[in-house]
Image (cartoon, coloured by chain):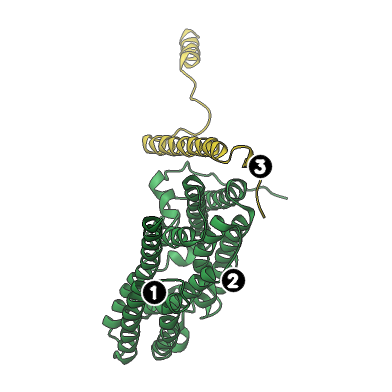
Amino acid sequence: MSLTLTRVEPSIAGVGDYIELLKPRVMSLVVFTAFVGLLIAPGQVHPMVGFTALLCIAVGAGAAGALNMWYDADIDARMTRTAARPIPAGRVAPGEALAFGVMLAVGSVVVLGLLVNVIAAALLAVTIAFYVGVYTMWLKRRTPQNIVIGGAAGALPPVIGWVAATGSLAVEPVLLFAIIFFWTPPHFWALSLYRTEDYTRAGIPMLPVVAGARETRRQIVLYTLLLAPLGVAPWLLGYAGLSYGVVALATGAVMIALALRVRAEEEGTHTASKQLFGFSILYLFLLFAMLLGDHLAGGLLAHGAA
Amino acid sequence: MTMMNGVVSGAMNEPKPEPGIKLTEQQQRARRARSVAIAVSLGVLVVLFYIMTLVKGPGVLVRPL
């Protein structure tokens, strides 16, 4: 039996590299949707409890991002969009990223369980496990439905926020989950339409790579037709006011119009895909911002009447 | 013999190289920045637990399922 020792070079990773492992842009959307879930939940939440819940959700999301970058370092190196990430660029060793991710994942779940409540902590653990285990390790390299099923992980933060505030589930956070779940496919498929070469080079079976651009455009339209009514549902079911309903109707109509433009777009041109990708981020932000604004306005009116 | 002795005594007077890996200036800077970040994070965690203990009072150990 021989023992091979490999010399490990001392790390040159800076703090910024570790922050990059947390995927701060994804984290900001996660924190925002969780914040909305937390604030629109019934009852009063102490600001420190709310802050702790959001901090744990943010760190948990970051941990999932770091573990995703650890596992996907080989395909990240083959894609122009991701080649400069800390691991493929050689600034952070894979083992360091793994240890960092595991430590943050365990830490965020434990702290959320100790300081907020156990159900929220369990949901955060499920979210991290789903993103890393189900999406990254299992689905991403195997099926074009990767982002459809994997989208559940990205849709859970508002539910965790709600549960952190109330300790229980209800219809409203499930509705928020559904909105993000059905928003994910048109959002990522619009991106993948103009990044098809990247995904092909990396061997990731995204829908345009496996089924072609035409089928992807068709499915973008189908999912957007499901998404737009779901966006209006909080108003129709009486969970949000008229201002939310008007914005949801208008922006939902724009989403459908852009999806139809994507479908009508000629092969090789990606103007409409880029527009849909950009607008989809604004759409989700506006829906959640309006829910928040509607709730805060309702609270102020009730306070004024009392 | 004297020369040989001189060589021997000269080699004995030379400072021994420090054992282990010698970090470059960049590696030292990076390690210091990481250490400071870890210290700040741990400090934030301690303060967070302290404040949450004050906020929750005796109920800090009551964690509803």
Establish if A182 lies above or below B5. Answer: below
Give how far across and how far down residue A274 sits, in percent.
30, 77
Name, please, the residue furthest toward the right: A1
Choose top left, top right, bottom left or bottom right for residue B29: top left
- Decide: few, some or many residues near mark 2? Use Cα within 10 Å; few <14, some 14-19, many ≥20: some
Asked whether the beta carbons under mark 3 and mark 2 sit within 8 Å of each other, the answer is: no
* Chain identity of mark 2: A
Could you give the CA–CA distance between mark 2 and mark 1, rounded to whole angstroms?
20 Å
Query: From the image, which quarter does the C terminus of chain A lie in?
Result: bottom left
Give me the chain that's green.
A
Residue A80 visible (yes or no): no
Residue at x 49% of width, y 74% of height: A181
| Amino acid found under the numbered disc labelled 3 | Leu
- Residue A178: x, y in percent? 50, 75
Determine whether, in the image, residue A53 is placed left or right of residue A235: right
What label sits on residue A198 in the rendered view?
1
Residue type at mark 1: give it. Answer: Asp
Residue sticking out furthest to the top: B2
Q: Where does the image place residue A219, in percent across and percent down from the top left?
A: 44, 87
Q: Given the image, on which type of amino acid does mark 2 rest?
A: Trp
Residue at disc 3, secondary structure: helix
Give the chain of mark 1. A
Q: Position of residue B31 (x, y in %)?
A: 44, 37
- CA separation in Å, label 3 and label 1: 51 Å
The reply to whether dot 2 and dot 1 touch (C-beta < 8 Å) is: no
Q: Within 10 Å of the Cα at label 1, are there few (<14), some (14-19), or many (20+) other Cα atoms?
A: some
Would you say A108 lies left or right of A88 here? right
**A293 or A3, nearer to the observer:** A293
Check disc 2 and report the residue beneath it: A138
The chain painted yellow is B
**Nearer to us: label 3 or label 2:** 3
